[in-house]
Image (cartoon, rainbow, N blue to C red):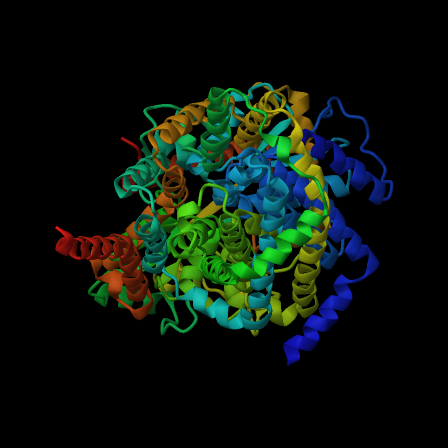
C-alpha cells in the first residue's frame, strides 16, 4: 500500500525537521492512527486548499501526534465523499470538509444522504459571493449591469461552478429580483469561471473572493458588489487603491440578493462524545493560530467559528433556507 | 533581454547544492509514483505536498516539479514492459513500446521513450521561457466553443487519420462516449445512466478502464498463447542507449511534429492525454513506415512520448500565468503555491520573479537530471523482461488490482477493471481498436460540456462554432482531417482502377 507507506514517511520526515514542541495535555480520547480529511471536491479547489492548510497547521503545532492525510473524493458533486462518511459510521479517524453542498447535493440528486447522520464538529468560516465583471467592461455598478441585462436581446451570460448549486441559486435570485433573464453557464470550477470571464466569454461570474483574486489583482476582472448584508471587513489594499472592504453590498446597488456559504467540518455518525470533543478542541485551537487568521484574510473568508449547539442550530436554519431556495428555483430532484 | 538575465539568476538559485539534492530526490520519488498505476502524478504530488510546507517556496516547488518530471518519465516504464500504462498519457506509448519489448528490444524502447520525453519536455520549457506572456494571452481566447473545436479536432483526426477500419473506429468512439456519460452531468446537475447504483455514480474512472483494457486484456491474450518465454532475447547493455541515440536524428520530423502538437495541446488545455494520441495518430499517417505501426516501430514510441511531455510541460504555463491548471497534477501544484502564499496569475511573473525564474531554471535542470537517472535504470528495468511470464503475470495482476483500488479506494473498481479486461480481450480478438474508446472516455464528457456551454451562451444557435477566425479555423481543420483519409484513399482507388482499365 504505497499511500500507507507515504503516510508513515511524512510524519517521520516532518518530525526530523521540526523543533520539539510540547505535546497537548492528555485527553479522554486521542487518535491512535492517521486521521483522514475527506475533501468532497477535487485537488486545488477552495475546499482542498482549506483542508491542506488545516493539515499543515495541525502538523506544525502538533495538535495530534498522528499524521493527517487529505483524500479527495470529488465524484458526483461531492456525493462520493459524503457517501464515504455515511459508510464509515463509528470511525473516529475520518473528517469531511463541508460547504452548503451538504444540503444541496442530496436535494438535487435525491441520493439518500443527510447531514443528520453525521456528527457535526465545527463551522470554521463563511464564504462570500461577489458579482465580478471583466475589467474592460463598461459596467461600474450592479445597476449598470442589470440595466444592460434588461435591454440585451440575447440574455447576458453569467458563469459559475456546477449546476443547481450555490452560483446557480444566486443567478436565479438575481433574475427574480432584477426582472432580467440571464444565461447561466456552469463550469467545473471557480477558477475556470474566472478565466472565462477574463477572456470575455461570459459577461459576469459569481465567484468567491479567492476564486477571482488573482485576476482582480492582475487587472483582468473587477468586483461590482458582494452578495451580503454587510460589506466585508478586510481593509488592507488588495489591488492599487482597493480592498475587500471597499466593495459595496449588492443590496445597496439595487440588487437585493444576499447569500453566504458555510465552511465546516463533520465526522461520521455514531462516534463517542470524547471523540467528538477531541476534534472540537482541535479546530478551536486551529481557528486561533496566526496561520489560520492569515489564511482567512488571504481568501477574504468571514471568520465565524461555531461548535456544539450553535453549529447545529445554524445547520438546521441553513438547511431550511436552502430547501426553500432550491424549491423556488425548481432545482429539487423529482 | 531582461528575461534572459532573470533566467540566469534563476539557474543560480536552482543550482545550489540542496536544490540539486531535492531535484534528484524528487525525480526518484516521481519514478516510483509513475511506475505504480493508479498512484499517479497528481496523487504523488498531493501526498508529498505537506512535506514541503516547512521549506522555502523555491526549494519546495523544485522538489514537487521534479516529482512531476519523474512521474512523467516513470509512466513509460510499465507501458513498455507490461503493456500497463502507469499514467493516462502513456496509453499511446504501449501501442509500439510493448511489441518492441516482446521482441526483446525493451532497452531500445525505454531509451527511445525517455529521450523523447526529454525532448518534448525541453521544447515545452523553451516555450515557457520565451513566449510566456504571449501564450498566456492566447489561452484566454479559448471559450467553450473553442474548447469544443479542439476536442472535435482530436476526434476527427483520429477517425480520418486512422488506418484501421473506419466503421470500427467510430463504433469504438461511440462506446467511449457512452461510458463517459455515466455519472453526474455537470451541466444539468443530474445523475445519468447510474441505474440507481451508488458505485456507478462516480462514473467510469479512466485509469481503471485503461488498466483493465490494456493490462488485464494483455494478460488474457498472453495466457491464451500459452505463456511463452518472450523476454529471453532481452540484451542488457548500456551501449544500447548510445546505439538508439544514433538512430534518432532520422526521426527529426516526427519529433518536431509531436513537439508542436504537444505544445499546442498543453497551452490550450487539451492536455497531455489528447496530445499523446494525436502525436501518435499523425505520425502513423505521415510516416513512411506507418503501416508497420503497432508492430514495434520505434517512431510509434517517440511520437506519443514527445507530444505528451511537451504538453505536460506547457500545461504549467497557463497554471503560472493564469492560475488555470492544464492538468490534474498542475492543479495540485496550484494548491501548493497557494499554501505557500504565492498567488498564481498574471501578477506572479511581476511580483515573484525569483520564484518563477527559479522554477523555470529548475525545469531545465530537473529534466536533465531525470534523463540521466532514468537512463541509468534502463538495464535494470529491461532485465525484468528476462523473468518468465508465468512469474511476472501474477505480479502484474496484483499491481493492476492495487492500482485500480487506489484510485478511489473502492473494491468495486477492481471488478470494473476485470470486466474491462474482458472487453479488451474481445476487442483485440475482433480487431476493434481500443484507442478511440479510451480517447472518447477521457475527452467525451469534456467535449459535451463545452458543446452545451457554448450553446447555452449562444441561445441555441450553432453559429457560435464559426463566430470567429479561431473557432472557425479549428472546425475547418477538423473536417479536413476527418475527410483526409477517405478522400486520399478514394483517389488512390480511382487511380488504380483507371490505370487498371486498359489492361482489361
Q: Position of residue A235 (x, y in %)?
A: 59, 64
Query: Vertically, is B403 above or below B237?
Result: above
Q: Position of residue B112 (x, y in %)?
A: 59, 50
Q: Is residue B174 left or right of residue B77?
A: left
> Residue A304: in sight, yes or no?
no
Q: Nearer the viewer, residue B431 or A283?
A: B431
Q: Nearer the viewer, residue B273 or B142?
A: B273
Tell me the quadrant of the picture where the N terminus of chain B can be found. Answer: bottom right
Q: Position of residue B302 (x, y in %)?
A: 53, 52
Q: Is residue B173 left or right of residue B380?
A: left
> Residue B452: in sight, yes or no?
yes
Q: Nearer the viewer, residue A169 or B461?
A: B461
Task: Give me the residue at 51% from left, 37% from top.
Answer: A40
Q: Residue furthest front?
A: B503
Q: Is residue B83 left or right of residue A272?
A: left
Q: Is residue A186 left or right of residue A83?
A: left
Query: Vertically, is B2 above or below B321?
Result: below
Based on the displayed image, in which of its 4 quarters is residue B100 positioned?
Answer: top right
Q: Nearer the viewer, residue A253 or B472?
A: B472
Task: Give me the residue at 58% from left, 29% from top.
Answer: B230
Amino acid at each position: 500500500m504505497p499511500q500507507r507507506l507515504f503516510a508513515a514517511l511524512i510524519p517521520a520526515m516532518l518530525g526530523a525537521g521540526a523543533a520539539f514542541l510540547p505535546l497537548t495535555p492528555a485527553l479522554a480520547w486521542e487518535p491512535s492512527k492517521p486521521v483522514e480529511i475527506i475533501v468532497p471536491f477535487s485537488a486545488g479547489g477552495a475546499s482542498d486548499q482549506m483542508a491542506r492548510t488545516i493539515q499543515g497547521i495541525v502538523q506544525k503545532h502538533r495538535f495530534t501526534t498522528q499524521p493527517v492525510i487529505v483524500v479527495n473524493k470529488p465524484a458526483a458533486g461531492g456525493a462520493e465523499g459524503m457517501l464515504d462518511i455515511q459508510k464509515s459510521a463509528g470511525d473516529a479517524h475520518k473528517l469531511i470538509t463541508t460547504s452548503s453542498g451538504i444540503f444541496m447535493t442530496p436535494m438535487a440528486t435525491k441520493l439518500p444522504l443527510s447531514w443528520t447522520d453525521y456528527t457535526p464538529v465545527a463551522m470554521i468560516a463563511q464564504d462570500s459571493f461577489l458579482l465580478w465583471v471583466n475589467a474592460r467592461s463598461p459596467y461600474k455598478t450592479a445597476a449598470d449591469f442589470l440595466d444592460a441585462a434588461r435591454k440585451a436581446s440575447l440574455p447576458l451570460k453569467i458563469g459559475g461552478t456546477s449546476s443547481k448549486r450555490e452560483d446557480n441559486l444566486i443567478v436565479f435570485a438575481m433574475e427574480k429580483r432584477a426582472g432580467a433573464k440571464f444565461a447561466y453557464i456552469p463550469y467545473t470550477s471557480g477558477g475556470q469561471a474566472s478565466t472565462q470571464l477574463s477572456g470575455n466569454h461570459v459577461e459576469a461570474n459569481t465567484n468567491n473572493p479567492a476564486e477571482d483574486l488573482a485576476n482582480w489583482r492582475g487587472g483582468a476582472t473587477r468586483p461590482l458588489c458582494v452578495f451580503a448584508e454587510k460589506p466585508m471587513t478586510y481593509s488592507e489594499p488588495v489591488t492599487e487603491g482597493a480592498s475587500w472592504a471597499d466593495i459595496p453590498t449588492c443590496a445597496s446597488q439595487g440588487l437585493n440578493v444576499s447569500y453566504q456559504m458555510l465552511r465546516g467540518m463533520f465526522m461520521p455518525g455514531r462516534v463517542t462524545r470524547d471523540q467528538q470533543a477531541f476534534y472540537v478542541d482541535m479546530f478551536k485551537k486551529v481557528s486561533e493560530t496566526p496561520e489560520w487568521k492569515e489564511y482567512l484574510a488571504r481568501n477574504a473568508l468571514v471568520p465565524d467559528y461555531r461548535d456544539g449547539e450553535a453549529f447545529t442550530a445554524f445547520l438546521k436554519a441553513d438547511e431550511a433556507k436552502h430547501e426553500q431556495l432550491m424549491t423556488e428555483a425548481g432545482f429539487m430532484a423529482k | 533581454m531582461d528575461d534572459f538575465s532573470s533566467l540566469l539568476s534563476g539557474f543560480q538559485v536552482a543550482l545550489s547544492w540542496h536544490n540539486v539534492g531535492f531535484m534528484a530526490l524528487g525525480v526518484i520519488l516521481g519514478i516510483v509514483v509513475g511506475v505504480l498505476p493508479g498512484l499517479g502524478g497528481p496523487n504523488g504530488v498531493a501526498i508529498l505536498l505537506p512535506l514541503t510546507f516547512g521549506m522555502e517556496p523555491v526549494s519546495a516547488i523544485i522538489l514537487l516539479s521534479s516529482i512531476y518530471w519523474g512521474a512523467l518519465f516513470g509512466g513509460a516504464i510499465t507501458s513498455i514492459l507490461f503493456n500497463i500504462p502507469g499514467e493516462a498519457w502513456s496509453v499511446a506509448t504501449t501501442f509500439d513500446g510493448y511489441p518492441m519489448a516482446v521482441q526483446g528490444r525493451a532497452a531500445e524502447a525505454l531509451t527511445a521513450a525517455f529521450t523523447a520525453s526529454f525532448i518534448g519536455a525541453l521544447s515545452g520549457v523553451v516555450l515557457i521561457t520565451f513566449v510566456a506572456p504571449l501564450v498566456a494571452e492566447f489561452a484566454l481566447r479559448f471559450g467553450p466553443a473553442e474548447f469544443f473545436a479542439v476536442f472535435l479536432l482530436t476526434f476527427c483526426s483520429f477517425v480520418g487519420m486512422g488506418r484501421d477500419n473506419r466503421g470500427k473506429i467510430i463504433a469504438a468512439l461511440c462506446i467511449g462516449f457512452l461510458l463517459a456519460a455515466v455519472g453526474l452531468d455537470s451541466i444539468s446537475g443530474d445523475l445519468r445512466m447510474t441505474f440507481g447504483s451508488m458505485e456507478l455514480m462516480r462514473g467510469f474512472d479512466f485509469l481503471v478502464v485503461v488498466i483493465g483494457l490494456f493490462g488485464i486484456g494483455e494478460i488474457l491474450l498472453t495466457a491464451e498463447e500459452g505463456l511463452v518465454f518472450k523476454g529471453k532475447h532481452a540484451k542488457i547493455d548500456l551501449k544500447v542507449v548510445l546505439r538508439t541515440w544514433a538512430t534518432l536524428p532520422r526521426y527529426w520530423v516526427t519529433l518536431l511534429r509531436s513537439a508542436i502538437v504537444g505544445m499546442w495541446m498543453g497551452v490550450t488545455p487539451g492536455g497531455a492525454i489528447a496530445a499523446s494520441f494525436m502525436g501518435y495518430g499523425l505520425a502513423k499517417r505521415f510516416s513512411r513506415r506507418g503501416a508497420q505501426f503497432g508492430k514495434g516501430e520505434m517512431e510509434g514510441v517517440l511520437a506519443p512520448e514527445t507530444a505528451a511531455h511537451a504538453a505536460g510541460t506547457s500545461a504549467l504555463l497557463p497554471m503560472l500565468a493564469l492560475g488555470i491548471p492544464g492538468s490534474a497534477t498542475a492543479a495540485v501544484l496550484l494548491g501548493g503555491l497557494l499554501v505557500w502564499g504565492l498567488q498564481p496569475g498574471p501578477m506572479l511573473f511581476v511580483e515573484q520573479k525569483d520564484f518563477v525564474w527559479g522554477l523555470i531554471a529548475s525545469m531545465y535542470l530537473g529534466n536533465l537530471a531525470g534523463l540521466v537517472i532514468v537512463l541509468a535504470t534502463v538495464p535494470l528495468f529491461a532485465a525484468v523482461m528476462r523473468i518468465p511470464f508465468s512469474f511476472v503475470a501474477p505480479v502484474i495482476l496484483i499491481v493492476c488490482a492495487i492500482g485500480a483500488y487506489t484510485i478511489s479506494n473502492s473494491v468495486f473498481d477492481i471488478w470494473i477493471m476485470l470486466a474491462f479486461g474482458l472487453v479488451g480481450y474481445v476487442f483485440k480478438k475482433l480487431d476493434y481498436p481500443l484507442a478511440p474508446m479510451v480517447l472518447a472516455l477521457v475527452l467525451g464528457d469534456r467535449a459535451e460540456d463545452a458543446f452545451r456551454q457554448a450553446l447555452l451562451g449562444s441561445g441555441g444557435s450553432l453559429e457560435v462554432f464559426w463566430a470567429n477566425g479561431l473557432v472557425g479555423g479549428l472546425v475547418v481543420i477538423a473536417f479536413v482531417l476527418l475527410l483526409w483519409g477517405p478522400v486520399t484513399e478514394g483517389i488512390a482507388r480511382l487511380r488504380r482502377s483507371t490505370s487498371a482499365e486498359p489492361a482489361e
